[in-house]
Image (cartoon, rainbow, N blue to C red):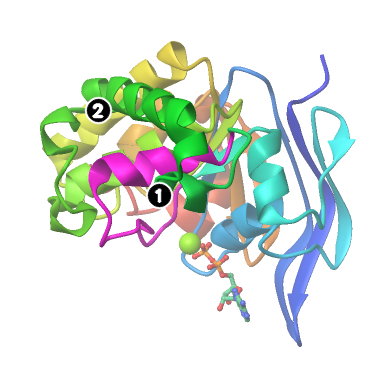
Amino acid sequence: MSALLEIQHVTKRFGGLCAISDCSVAVETGHTHGIIGPNGAGKTTLFNLITGIYKPTEGAIRFRGESIAGLRPGRIALKGIGRTFQNIRLCKELTVLDNVRIAFDSQLHYAPIEALIRLPRSGRGEQRSIDESLRLLEPFGLLAHAHDRAGDLPYGHQRKLEIARALALKPSALLLDEPAAGLNTGETAALTEFLRWVRGEFDVTLVLIEHHMHLVMNLCDRITVLDFGQTIADGTPEEIRANPRVIEAYLGGADDE
Ligand SMILES: Nc1ncnc2c1ncn2[C@@H]1O[C@H](COP(=O)(O)OP(=O)(O)O)[C@@H](O)[C@H]1O
Ligand SMILES: [Mg+2]
């Protein structure tokens, strides 16, 4: 079986700094794939390369066998790759509902701006995106907050809203950049179960950057370890846990559970 998402010998340089160096990762359909490594290892850069924010200096990125390296972020999102950000990026001034609706509307055949200023010809699409958005918000525990300003939500709810918004595009792969950052141990355990539910309910392949080892080891089918932009290990959670290079570079003392 060929992988859903393939990063092949990718290098990304910023001037003299090599943030990603000859990195290869294969994410299988249906898997939850963890990307771990110390701060500055290049994890977020890898997501920015996959989602079109950066173009690789060298190497190939394929999604469903098709080259996506260098495509614009919007095109890549519509091809089925959703993401969340290490620092939450919501439209904080808009309501919870409208944050999700913008994502829905970008799939429909009219410009989102038309929907927001309520031009008559977008009427039917508008109702559909409202209905679908509300349906999506419900299992995220956000229905009661649908008309609240997104920026007013508690932090954990904002993280969930970002996931809901990414799922509104019906991605087949969802990239999560440190989804448990800022959550306490209890909240992280709840997020682990929530992501397990998301994976089944939305039939989505997850790629997860995370420092909480309990979450990573519990959820991931496969893990890639980066250090200084290079892949230093790739394997099952058991293999990663036992890998001396990983323990030396990263795992020693890093288990914060
Ligand atoms: N746009 C950029 N310009 C210059 N350097 C960058 C840029 N983005 C990331 N870097 C550098 O690339 C390295 C990897 O960063 P990052 O991917 O954010 O690491 P991680 O997410 O693993 O903590 C760091 O040294 C960071 O400073
Ligand atoms: Mg990062």
Which amino acid does the dot numbered 1 rest on?
A: Leu
| Residue 27 in which image quadrant | top right
For label 2, count other residues whose C-alpha is less than 10 Å away and answer few (under 14), some (14-19) or many (20+): some
The percent coordinates of residue 66 (x first, y second) are 87, 35
Question: Which quarter shows the N terminus?
Answer: top right
Ligand 2 within 8 angstroms of badge 2 C-beta: no
Can residue 121 be seen by looking at this rendering? yes
Q: Which residue is label 2 attached to?
A: 140
**SS class, disc 1:** helix
Label at residue 40: none
The location of residue 236, given as percent across then percent down, is: 57, 26
Dots 1 and 2: beta carbons under 8 Å?
Answer: no
Q: Which residues are magenta?
A: 84-107
Residue 55's image quarter? Answer: bottom right
Mark 1 = which residue?
116
- Identified by mark 2, the residue type is Phe
Local SS, label 2: helix
At 80% across and 27% down in the image, what residue appears? 64
| Residue at image point 42% right, 23% down | 128
